């Protein structure tokens, strides 16, 4: 399952709207919408803010 599907499924399981998710995560509604639609983002910090509500986090696959 990809991140966008994971977030949408978890949000629906909690019975919250995209607006409520954005408020709880401290991100904008537009970011949540685009994230659920699968739009590419370089803002891993914001993705992790949303994922942290579900006890998950994303890590970069890039090696330093």
Image: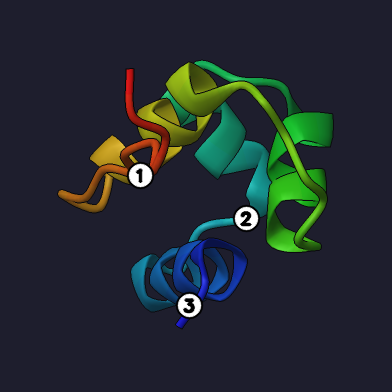
Who is closer to the viewer here, 57 or 32?
57
Q: Mark 3 Cα within 10 Å, few/some/many (few <14, many 20+)? A: few
The quadrant of the image that shows the N terminus is bottom left
Of circles 1 and 3, the one toward us is: 1
Return the residue at label 1.
51
Q: Secondary structure at mark 1?
A: helix
Q: Residue at x 39, y 36 (%)?
A: 60
Dot 3 or dot 2, earlier in sequence:
3
Who is closer to the viewer here, 57 or 10?
57
The x, y position of residue 20, in whole percent, is: 56, 40
Q: Secondary structure at mark 2?
A: loop
Who is closer to the viewer here, 21 or 1?
1
Between the residue at mark 1 and the residue at mark 3, the CA separation in whole angstroms equals 12 Å
Between the residue at mark 1 and the residue at mark 2, the CA separation in whole angstroms equals 15 Å
Return the residue at label 3.
9
Indicate left or right for 39 with 2 as reference: right
The x, y position of residue 33, in whole percent, is: 79, 48
The x, y position of residue 3, in whole percent, is: 51, 62
The quadrant of the image that shows the C terminus is top left
Kindly identify which numbered label has been placed on residue 17: 2
Dot 1 or dot 3, earlier in sequence:
3
Who is closer to the viewer here, 43 or 62?
62
Of circles 3 and 2, the one toward us is: 3
Is residue 46 shown above or below 1? above
Dot 1 or dot 2, earlier in sequence:
2
Q: What's the colour scheme?
A: rainbow
Q: Secondary structure at mark 3?
A: helix
Indicate left or right for 28 with 30 as reference: left
How many numbered marks appear?
Answer: 3
The x, y position of residue 56, in whole percent, is: 21, 50
Indicate left or right for 52 with 17 as reference: left
Is residue 15 shown above or below 35? below
């Amino acid at each position: 399952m990809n991140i966008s599907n994971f977030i949408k499924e978890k949000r629906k399981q909690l019975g919250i709207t995209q607006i409520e998710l954005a408020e709880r995560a401290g991100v904008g509604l537009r970011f949540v919408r685009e994230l659920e639609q699968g739009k590419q983002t370089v803002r891993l910090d914001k993705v992790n803010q949303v994922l942290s509500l579900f006890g998950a986090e994303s890590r970069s696959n890039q090696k330093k």
